[in-house]
Amino acid sequence: MVNNISLKWIEENMESYLLDTYKYLHQHPELSTQEQETQVFIKKELDRLNISYKVMAQTGLCAEIHGAEPGKTILLRADIDALPIHEQTSLDYSSKKPGVMHACGHDAHMTVGLGVATLLKERVSEWKGTVKIMFQPSEEVHPGGAKPMIEEGILENPKVDAAICLHTNPYLAPGKFELKNGYMLANSDDVHITLIGKGGHAAAPQQGIDAVAMAGQFLSGVQNIVSRQTSPLDHAVITFGKINGGTKSNVICDQVEIAGTVRTIKKETQERIQAQLEALVQSVASFWGGSYSFKFEKGYPAAWNDQKITDIARAALKSSLGNESVVEIEYPYMSGDDFAYVAQSVPSVFMYWGTGSQDRENYPWHHPRYHLNLSALKYGVTAATQCILNLLQTEEVGK
């Protein structure tokens, strides 16, 4: 059996490195597909550790660490892109780039990836097999960076037997990890609709076709798709977060654009809601005598946690951090992540990792005041490394 990774050892020997790395990355965020400086920083760290790597998906990297003997191959995903958000945390290590911020924890994911690489390299004589660390660009913008890295062969040569992904959770305490077998994340799709009417004077509405009124009727009807046409035992969310139309208070609006997202778990629910949305916009446009355009863009698929790999991760967490470290959740999150493409290709586990604070208000992902409890970093490295080592030495993995 692999010896348990010691949280205390990491705290005493690695925590200052983890803190420095995290703060640097947090101060230097880069948007999706633009992660050139981030890539250079990761390269320098891997060169310092004498770890080989391959450039993939232009701004991504695959680091490869080999143990003392051949064996299984395990992949750890760490996404690297930031968001177009202006930081409002007032931290002394806030983003130095106006309008760009690591507001989803990808800076912490990279820090854990580099921490795991450091630990595995230092103990290379104690384990066998290969570990790939997937420093992946462009998770925040569809089609994402996972798919091109897969297409460029990250899961081959050597073939990956299992993959894991840790993701920050600002509402979970450090030292806690959320797990479940089966679906963990949702299908994440986008909807773009244009309702087209006929302009005119507000004092004579009968002479025009009011696109604002069309949009109001459509948005009101949308609420019935989940509340009255979807089983309460199913999982579905429809959110329209953007609407744009009109020029002046006394002008009948001739065109309204609406954009939103649909989150589902089951493929049949995804397809039914797509059809219902188009049927609804068609009926509204027909009633008003207008027209429409409808575009449903399928995004990241729902992510599935393999039971065997999840059970191994669960046991690894309990052995290294205690039974109380595992938080079993009953229902999947309705967020999406392109790690799902990895999970479609190899047995995988996606887990949420507690990064919340007790001494200040916690904000959700993608919020300008999103922040990370720095004490969570050592737990992330401990958990990820222990899961990797247990997967490497479990005979059933890869069969």
Image: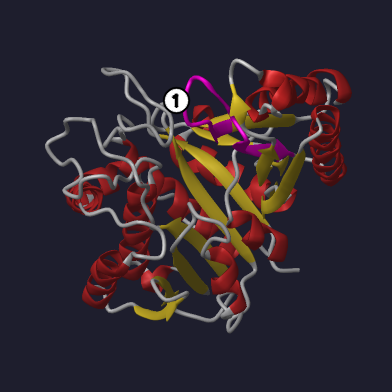
Q: Is residue 368 above or below residue 308?
A: above
Q: Is residue 275 above or below residue 153?
A: above
The residue type indicated by label 1 comes to Tyr
Residue in front for this viewpoint, 243 or 105: 243
Q: Is residue 330 visible?
A: no
Location of residue 378 (image quadrant):
top left
Q: Residue at x 16, y 30 (%)?
A: 90
Is 141 or 135 nearer to us in this picture?
A: 141
Q: Can you say whether 118 is above or below 303 in the image?
A: below
- Colour style of the rendered protein structure: secondary structure
Residue drawn at x 72%, y 47% is 293
Q: Secondary structure at mark 1?
A: loop
Looking at this view, name the residue that lies furthest to the left: 92
**Residue identified by numbered label 1:** 171
Q: Let me know if residue 157 is in the magenta part.
A: no
> In the image, which residues are magenta?
241-264
Locate residue 254, reporting x and y percent: 62, 35
Quick one: 246 or 65, which is closer to the camera? 246
Q: Quadrant of the C terminus?
A: bottom right
Q: Main secondary structure of the magenta part?
A: strand
Q: Position of residue 187 (x, y in %)?
A: 70, 45
Name which residue lies at 39% across and 51% down: 109
The percent position of residue 179, horizontal first and vertical second, equals 61, 37
Q: In the rendered view, does 129 fall on the left or right side of 161?
A: left
